[in-house]
């Protein structure tokens, strides 16, 4: 009986904790939103953060995109040639990347590369009393530290996702045309004819903007809420990756279901 | 203009079920250096946070320049804080900014001064703490004492009327300790400020403080000038000033009978 009680207590505790975190995250998002306009008046702070989150994520995004594109080229050709339509490989690579893999894989890479950095930095700033010092200097840490990083994440993500798709297509082209020998004209023309700007590219960009907002906000909240200890910061960093990945994959399904008319 | 720049009246504060302060009364007169002393965990740093409005008291009030801190709006609270400078225990320097940028930070945030004037102010403050030559270094390149001095230069960048020091001597070598000790007194007198120093370093504090409060178990147990306290026969003050192991402040954390504890067979 006692074990049962403990079991239900643990479930209740976890649920209350989860709801509390959701509320605290929502409240922080509201405060960040209050400072967004003020923050945009200081573009130098945002540019500095765009460099830290976006530019420094370029290498991992470019390399990953090229490999993902090459794998898509190989797998696509392997399947399409069975049906005698290997020229459609350009369409397959482009649509897979622009609609899904570009925004989703970029968001996952962003969470691992930039999200963890944001969480660890803010968590350590809290642990070393830098945020308290800012408060005591009558400077809001939300306006000075969190809001520029929010802008940076939201701006960087769609640019990185578009770059991911472009490099991925080049990777697919590299495998399909020079290596396998698919006709270059067919590769590009089929892609041009079947990829729609509004339905495919813009929808992909919308997804990446949403992922940018969500991933950055999770990273900011986890850092800001982290207990000021080494263990607290390390756990917060882990949570950033886990929650961001789950949120991206879950939201991808929701957004796709709205975008595709079945 | 009131004689006391900061007043703490009947202040109580606690976390959850634990009451840290139980009806504390203190006054901090203008132009004076006042020290708050007490053992670790006696809530000295919390008192600074209550004065700075980072925490809200359970009961009582903190007045800064005649205004109750915790009843102010955020904007008004920030206005009050602009009159304050705080030196954190380990400096709390912004690690992504150089020494120069750290000291320039409050000036950039709160003034529209041209870069040439900011530079002059920063160099003036860094010179006052003896670190003008270190303006280009990053916080990671500084020793503990240097970081504390840079943080002090940053705390006084806007010429505050209240300077709060949280354990300014913790972990410093004797030379740095002496330097910081002199700086606290000289900066206070040069700026005409009021200084509140939270510390448990008896020797240094007795050299520069005008008035001292001893805090223990949530209440002020003794107060007076350094001379008065040196002569005090109060058991707590005697134990604290002479660093005695046992006295009113016990060495052992409350525990059960030692003999029983040792004889107990632990359940496997």
Image (spheres, rainbow, N blue to C red):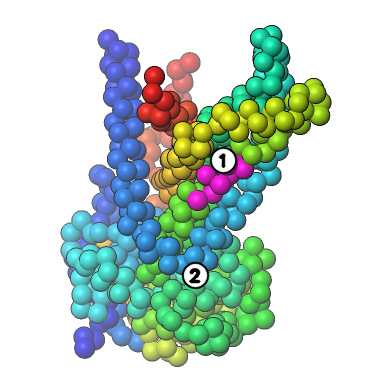
Dominant secondary-structure state across the stretch colored magenta: helix
Residue drawn at point x = 65 percent, y = 46 percent: A58
Query: Which residue occupies the foreground of this view, A163 or B122?
Result: A163
- Asked which quadrant contains residue A95, the reply is top right
Q: Secondary structure at mark 2?
A: loop
Q: Which residues are magenta?
A: A155-164
Q: Nearer the viewer, mark 2 or mark 1?
A: 1
Residue B40 visible in image? no
Residue drawn at point x = 50 percent, y = 85 percent: B114
- Please say if the residues under marks 2 and 1 sit with CB atoms less than 8 Å apart: no
Above or below, comparing residue B257 to residue B190 in the picture: above
Query: Which residue occupies the foreground of this view, B15 or A169?
Result: A169
**Which x, y percent locates residue B57?**
23, 59
Residue drawn at point x = 67 percent, y = 15 percent: A85
Residue drawn at point x = 33 percent, y = 37 percent: A22
Residue at numbered disc 2 = B168
Given the image, what chain letter belongs to the residue carrying mark 1? A
- Name the side, left or right, on which A139 lies relative to A236: left
- Name the side, left or right, on which B222 lies relative to A251: left
Q: Which mark is residue B157?
A: none
Q: Is residue A120 magenta?
A: no
């Amino acid at each position: 009986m006692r074990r049962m009680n403990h079991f239900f207590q643990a479930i209740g505790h976890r649920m209350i904790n989860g709801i509390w975190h959701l509320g605290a995250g929502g409240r922080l998002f509201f405060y960040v939103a209050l400072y967004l306009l003020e923050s945009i008046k200081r573009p130098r702070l945002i540019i500095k953060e765009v460099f830290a989150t976006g530019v420094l994520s370029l290498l991992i995004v470019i390399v990953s995109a090229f490999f993902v594109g090459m794998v898509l080229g190989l797998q696509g050709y392997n399947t399409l040639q069975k049906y005698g339509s290997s020229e459609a490989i350009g369409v397959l690579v482009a649509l897979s990347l622009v609609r899904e893999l570009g925004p989703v894989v970029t968001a996952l890479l962003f969470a691992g590369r930039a999200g963890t950095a944001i969480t660890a930095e803010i968590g350590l700033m809290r642990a070393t009393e830098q945020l308290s010092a800012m408060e005591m200097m009558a400077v809001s840490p939300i306006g000075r530290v969190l809001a520029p990083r929010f802008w940076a994440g939201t701006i960087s993500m769609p640019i990185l996702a578009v770059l991911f798709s472009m490099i991925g297509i080049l990777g697919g082209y590299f495998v399909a045309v020079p290596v396998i020998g698919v006709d270059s004209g067919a590769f590009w023309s089929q892609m041009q004819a079947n990829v729609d700007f509004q339905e495919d590219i813009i929808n992909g960009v919308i997804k990446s903007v949403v992922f940018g907002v969500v991933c950055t906000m999770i990273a900011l909240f986890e850092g800001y809420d982290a207990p000021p200890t080494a263990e607290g910061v390390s756990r917060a960093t882990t949570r950033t990756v886990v929650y961001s990945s789950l949120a991206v994959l879950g939201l991808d399904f929701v957004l796709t279901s709205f975008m595709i008319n079945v | 203009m009131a004689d006391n720049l900061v007043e703490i009246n009947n202040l109580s504060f606690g976390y959850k079920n634990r009451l840290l302060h139980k009806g504390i009364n203190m006054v901090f007169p203008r132009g004076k250096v006042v020290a708050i002393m007490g053992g670790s965990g006696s809530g000295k740093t919390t008192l600074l946070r209550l004065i700075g409005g980072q925490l809200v008291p359970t009961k009582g009030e903190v007045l800064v320049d005649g205004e109750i801190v915790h009843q102010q709006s955020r904007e008004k609270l920030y206005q009050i804080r602009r009159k304050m400078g705080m030196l954190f225990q380990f400096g709390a320097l912004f690690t992504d900014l150089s020494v120069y940028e750290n000291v320039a930070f409050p000036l950039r945030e709160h003034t529209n001064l041209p870069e040439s004037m900011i530079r002059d102010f920063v160099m003036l403050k860094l010179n006052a703490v003896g670190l003008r030559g270190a303006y280009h270094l990053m916080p990671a390149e500084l020793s503990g004492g240097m970081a504390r001095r840079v943080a002090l230069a940053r705390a006084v960048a806007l010429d505050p009327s209240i300077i709060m020091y949280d354990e300014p001597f913790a972990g410093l070598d004797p030379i740095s300790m002496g330097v910081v000790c002199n700086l606290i007194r000289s900066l206070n007198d040069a700026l005409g400020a009021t200084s509140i120093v939270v510390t448990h370093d008896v020797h240094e504090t007795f050299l520069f403080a005008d008035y001292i409060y001893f805090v223990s178990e949530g209440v002020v147990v003794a107060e007076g000038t350094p001379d008065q306290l040196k002569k005090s026969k109060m058991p707590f003050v005697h134990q604290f000033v002479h660093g005695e192991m046992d006295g009113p402040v016990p060495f052992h954390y409350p525990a059960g009978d030692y003999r029983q504890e040792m004889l107990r067979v632990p359940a496997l």
